[in-house]
Amino acid sequence: MAPQISPSILSADFAALGVEVERIADAADWVHVDVMDNHFVPNLTLGLPIVEALLRTSRLPLDCHLMIEDPDRWAPQYAEAGAKSVTIHAEAASAPIRTLRTIRAAGARAGLGVNPATPVDRFEDILGEIDMLLLMTVEPGFGGQRFLDVVLPKVRRARDLIKGRDLDVWLQVDGGVSAETIERCAEAGADVFVAGSAVYGADDPSEAIRGLRAQAEK
Ligand code: DX5
Ligand code: ZN
């Protein structure tokens, strides 16, 4: 699959979210929305009401990344609201298969998020339940952190597992993805790239996205 770029609005101006999403609409594939509950991660961002407001205004599909406890309870609502991709964290879900199926049944792509220190091999048997595997390349919770190179072997491993089963599971990397690190991620097998500070920290976010895409395509 051609590389896709999913800019994270975590680094955007929260007082002007509609405008911030419009600024990337001509260049991005998705809008990555980081939902944090101050329990699963030590930060609090936004929830369903703001996602619903974004759904009303955004021309791009929403890629909702739920960094929350009890995703089994909350994730289906994001899919039902109209988010085209909903990712739950493996470390937080108590019934991931049921929840992933519920997300799919509501018409969204089902994503499974995996923290840097969580091995990916344990999910091999449920890859068929997943449309996207999100590998965190920083500890979740904040934008602007340094990319963790130690996760790259896991990106390779995940790509091998997906290939080995002949599945069409997208492989997303999230955290510290920038002009300096995106080529390493692509080379390891990632095909969906989240970038927060590298996009919204740039003077021209659309131009930054085009630059990232060109590097991922190399
Ligand atoms: C971190 C979030 C990321 C974050 C990435 O927990 O999941 O999506 O916004 O930000 P950067 O690209 O700045 O690392
Ligand atoms: Zn994220």
Image (tube, rainbow, N blue to C red):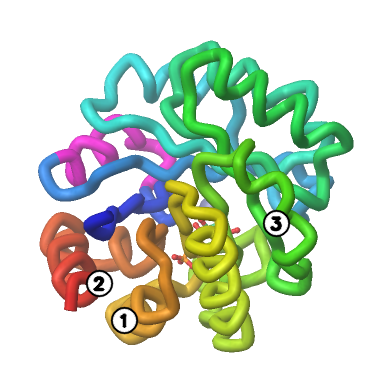
Secondary structure beneath label 1 = helix
Residue labelled with disc 1: 183
Instruction: Examine the residues drawn in magenta and state their main secondary structure.
Output: helix
Give the quadrant of the N terminus: bottom left
Q: Is disc 3 surrounded by few (<14), some (14 to 19) or many (20+) residues within 10 Å?
A: few
Check mark 2 vs ligand 1: CB closer than 8 Å? yes or no.
no
Q: Is residue 31 left or right of residue 118?
A: left
Q: Is residue 146 above or below residue 29?
A: below
Distance from label 2 to label 1 (Cα)? 5 Å
Secondary structure beneath label 2 = helix
Residue labelled with disc 2: 216
Residue at x 28% of width, y 54% of height: 4
* Amino acid on which disc 3 is placed: Glu
Residue at x 77% of width, y 67% of height: 118
Q: Is residue 65 above or below residue 152?
A: above
Q: Quadrant of residue 47?
A: top right
Span colored in magenta:
13-25
Magenta segment: does it hold 1?
Answer: no
Residue at x 33% of width, y 69% of height: 198
Instruction: Find residue 181 and report its horizontal and vertical position in percent.
Output: 38, 82
Q: Quadrant of residue 54?
A: top left
Residue labelled with disc 3: 124
Of the two numbered discs 2 and 1 on the same chain, state the one appearing first in sequence.
1
In the displayed orientation, state which residue is furthest to the right.
Answer: 94
Of the two numbered discs 2 and 3 on the same chain, state the one appearing first in sequence.
3
- The answer to the question of whether label 2 and label 1 lie on touching residues, with beta carbons closer than 8 A, is yes
Of the two numbered discs 3 and 1 on the same chain, state the one appearing first in sequence.
3
* Amino acid on which disc 2 is placed: Ala
